[in-house]
Image: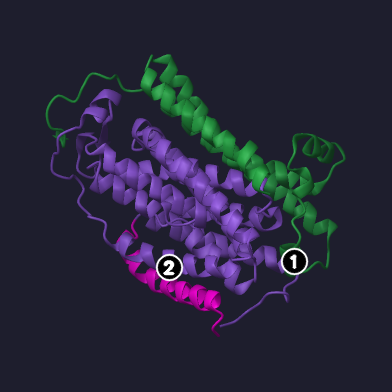
Chain colours: A green, B purple
Amino acid sequence: MSSASISEGDPGHVPPLPQEAYVRMTLVLRLGLGLSLAILGGGIVAYLLMNPGQSSSSVLANNPILSYLTLPGLASGLGSGSVSAVLTLGLIVLVATPIVRVVSGLYYFQKVGERAMTAITLAVLILLLLGLLVIGPHVR
Amino acid sequence: MVRLWGTVDLALFVVLLVLVAIAAGLVGSLTGLGGGVVVIPILAIFFGASIPIAIGTGFVTILATSSATGAAYVRDRLSDIRIGMFLEIATVPGALIGATATVLITHANLDAALFVALGVVLFAIIPGSLARRNIELPPPMPQDARSRHLGLTGEYHDPALNTDVSYQAARTSPAIGVMFGAGMVSGMFGIGGGVFKVLALERFLNLPMKVATATSNFMIGVTAAAGAGVMLAAGYVNPIVAAPVAIGTAFGAFLGSRLLPGLRNRTVRLLFLPVIAALAIEMILRGLGLP
């Protein structure tokens, strides 16, 4: 087997991330997607069974999750068995999956002692949470 | 053009959404365009969804495609996590600004302007998606100081070439600028991010084609999470629409990545780009209030 390089000069001495980091991130993606699809699939079947005869235009005109977009609202909705709250949870898991992947990146950059990449990854994580928890609710 | 809104029973609507999303996931994973280019115009044109709801659903297709196809790329170390994470520092703020702009434009009742802008962006990604270099391994370029400091280098095994390929990122400054713009377009419209990201990764960072594609796929999930976070919290992701779209897109993306490896990427693009062009024209006409 041959090797090819498209590098020029000394490539530097930063060690690569351990294979474990790649394995864990793959696991995060698979689990996150699988879990969100299971919740969304179960939720949409239950919604159809409980709302026969509804039309597409009525669904498009009313977003049923608005009251579940706060933590107390979501907890209360899940506690009372609301299908819309279950669907909201599925969406949150779907959105959170790449964010959890960023968290695992942060863990491994910190673990191998890469200060610059740790700081960059932490900044990305803070920005993501800012969008979800501050900017979105503020512009609603 | 056929318009179906207001006439479809919810169960049929959900089935149609799953079918559209399977096609979107298939096309998205085979072309790298992302499923939003199919789902957003179809929701807006055929089902009468409002533009922010269509865009919010577009983010769901990106999240599903990125997670469904990204696992294999990450496992095979084709996605460069270090380069992807470094560039997210530009795409994520871009996406936050873009998604916020979309919500504010909607509040100002300027949906028609969003229709036209979406159509224009759809057109803009056509030459971008055709302009890919199709060069497996680009000629060497010197690594810049930032790339050296952050260790933006990598290596992967290419079974097709039967060789181990090592690479290093060049010209990080212009790449950051392009990535901010890509994030903004993606956050604002739910489409286009992948095309512009791959172009920046190939043209500026000088990455091999496979690494650029896989790293873009890694990045679009995080960028979409930024835009989706804003749109979800602002109430513009409708779960009755998003759930079947997420399921269909993930299935289509899985099919695209596993069952059709022999289908040539360029062939799919050439077959599909006229459809995007037609949808873009319809979006612009709709925005301008023309029949």
SS for callout 2? helix
Spatial CA distance of label 1 from label 2 is: 31 Å
Category of crowding for the residue at label 2, using alpha-carbon neighbours closer than 10 angstroms: few (below 14), some (14–19), many (at least 20): some
Q: Position of residue B124 (x, y in %)?
A: 37, 64
Magenta segment range?
B262-291
SS for callout 1? helix
Q: Position of residue A139 (x, y in %)?
A: 65, 48
Q: Quick check: B225 left or right of B123? A: right
In the rendered image, is residue B210 in sight? Answer: no
The residue sitting at 71% across, 41% down in the picture is: A89
Residue type at numbered disc 1: Leu
Q: Which residue is mark 2?
A: B120
The extreme front residue here reads B108
* Magenta stretch secondary structure, dominant: helix
Q: Quick check: B73 left or right of B115? A: left
Disc 1 and disc 2 on one polypeptide chain:
yes
Q: Which residue is mark 1?
A: B10
Q: Quick check: B256 left or right of B58? A: left
